[in-house]
Amino acid sequence: MNEPDFYREYYEKLHSVERKLTPKEESRIKNTIAFIPEDVESLLEVGCGDGRIVNRLKGKYEEICGLDISNKALDYVETPKVQGTLENLPFADNSFDIVICCEVLEHLPYSVYKKAVKEMERVSKKYILISVPNNENLEREMITCPECGCSSHLWRHLRSFNEERLRNLFKDFEIHKIKTHSSEQFMFAGTFFKIKRFLNINQRFPQTALCPQCGYSPEYEAKSAHLKKENKGINLLKKVLPLKKAGGWIIVLYKCSGS
């Protein structure tokens, strides 16, 4: 399966089942929305998924639009919406006061990533607002396909970000506001992940997973039992291993250098 085909098929599958927001996701969304400047009148969210952010902004701006690669995800979007890709945005230059891109950049294939960053700059008039995982160790969330043995990230993350890397992300936009939201992690992370692998927690393919090499995907029937087993194992480890604040995500508001 070549990269573009996998990229599209994966996100159609990901949004084929409804998934409730976790408290951490709910907090991230609220904090991201709070970063939107007051002088914004037009807004585009790229990679909007099922509208978990853009739906909350419906009716608040003169012009608002959500864009996603997945038609199934867009079924849930309540604002004007467009099916499309980040590397080829179907909008004129400077079309929106702000372009929002949340928990997307870490997923983009390498052939798409740089083009998508340039496209976001092109269509934004004033601001770009992003959120990404903070200083993620990608090796710790790898899963292995039971059919062909291919290893891939549990959530299809392909790159890791930190504050330093984000400072030079855009050519003509500079950081206007930035905030890191740490999450609760295990103090001895290396030990924790060794135990996870030994107990086989989170190492099975989740129900929405798709192997990038052979296309293997598990059936949905085992979903409930799988999630219960994962939660029980994680909760047990939290009781016996010390915790600390780390990781989490970074929210960054960029402002056009010329505005």
Image (cartoon, helix red, strand yellow):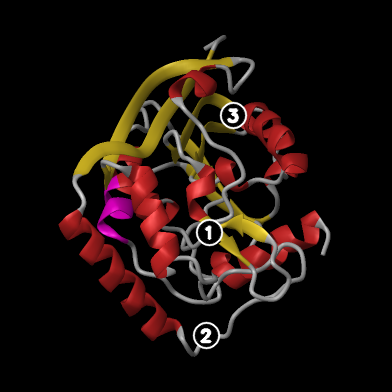
Instruction: Residue at the far left: name it.
Output: 239
Q: Sequence order check: which comes first, mark 1 or mark 3?
A: 3
Marks 2 & 1, CB-CB < 8 Å contact: no
Q: Select label 2 or label 3 by which is in front.
A: 2
Question: Which of the two marks, 2 or 1, is nearer to us in this view?
Answer: 1
Residue 258 highlighted magenta (yes or no): no
Magenta-drawn segment: 22-27
Q: Secondary structure at mark 2?
A: loop
Say which label, 2 or 3, has the lower sequence index: 3
* Vertical arrangement, residue 160 with respect to residue 255, above or below: below
Q: Position of residue 178 (x, y in %)?
A: 37, 23
Instruction: Name the residue carrying label 2.
Output: 220
Q: Amino acid at mark 3?
A: Ser
Is residue 24 within the magenta segment?
yes
The quarter of the rendered structure image containing the N terminus is bottom right
Disc 1 designates what residue? 154
Residue with the mark numbered 3: 124
| N-term mark: 2 or 1 | 1
Q: Label 1 sits on what residue type?
A: Leu
49 left or right, relative to 186:
right
- Front position in the image: 45 or 239: 239
Give the x, y percent position of residue 60.
36, 45
Residue at 16% x, 59% y: name it.
239
Q: Residue at point 58% right, 41% down?
A: 105
Q: Single out the mark in the foreground, 1 or 3.
A: 1
SS at mark 3 in the image: strand
Q: Quick one: label 1, few (<14), some, or many (20+) residues within 10 Å?
A: many
